């Protein structure tokens, strides 16, 4: 009886862990796609060029949304240029449902998106 329970736990436990890994990978890929689309749109709106057509996951943390619910916020970084000769850093923070913040490093385009510059 005991070994039957151990066998059952081992078998279904492995499947459960595998399902969690697949879910995590799918969610991370979907978030990265959303971050890339957002970075492209944000750069286009600011007349700067997104470099390498890519974003990189930087970190994750728990925060509260506007309703007070605890959510996981992910930070992605990307690089952009104004005229093509110098790289600048941009960052964005998003949850599964919305973009929380997008910031661009100060650059020489005549305006600067400093802390708190967000995408609407």
Image (cartoon, rainbow, N blue to C red):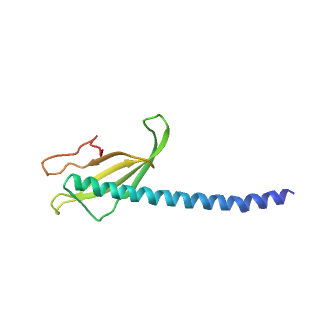
Image quarter of the C terminus:
top left
Image quarter of the N terminus:
bottom right
Q: In x, y percent, where is residue 3? A: 83, 60
The outermost residue toward the top is 68
User: Residue at 34% of width from left, 49% of height from top?
Assistant: 92
Q: In x, y percent, where is residue 112? A: 19, 46
Q: Is residue 73 above or below residue 40?
A: above
The outermost residue toward the right is 1
Q: Is residue 98 above or below residue 40?
A: above
Camera-nearest residue between 21 and 3: 21
Q: In x, y percent, where is residue 114? A: 24, 43
The outermost residue toward the left is 110
Q: Is residue 89 above or below residue 115?
A: below
Give residue 85's quadrant in the image. bottom left
The outermost residue toward the bottom is 52
Give residue 57's quadrant in the image. bottom left
Number of marks present in the image shown? 0
Please give left or right for residue 112 compared with residue 19 in the image. left
Q: In x, y percent, where is residue 99? A: 37, 47
Camera-nearest residue between 12 and 46: 46
User: Residue at 71% of width from left, 60% of height from top?
Assistant: 12
Please give left or right for residue 116 compared with residue 76 in the image. left
User: Residue at 40% of width from left, 46% of height from top?
Assistant: 98
């Amino acid at each position: 009886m005991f070994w039957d329970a151990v066998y059952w736990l081992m078998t279904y436990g492995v499947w459960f862990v595998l399902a969690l890994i697949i879910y995590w990978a799918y969610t991370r890929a979907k978030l990265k796609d959303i971050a890339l689309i957002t970075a492209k749109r944000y750069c286009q709106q600011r007349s700067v060029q997104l470099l390498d057509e890519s974003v990189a996951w930087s970190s994750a943390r728990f925060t509260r949304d506007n309703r007070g619910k605890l959510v996981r916020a992910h930070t992605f970084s990307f690089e952009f240029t104004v005229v093509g000769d110098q790289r600048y850093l941009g960052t964005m923070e998003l949850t599964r449902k919305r973009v929380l913040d997008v910031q661009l490093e100060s650059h020489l385009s005549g305006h600067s998106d400093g802390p708190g510059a967000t995408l609407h």
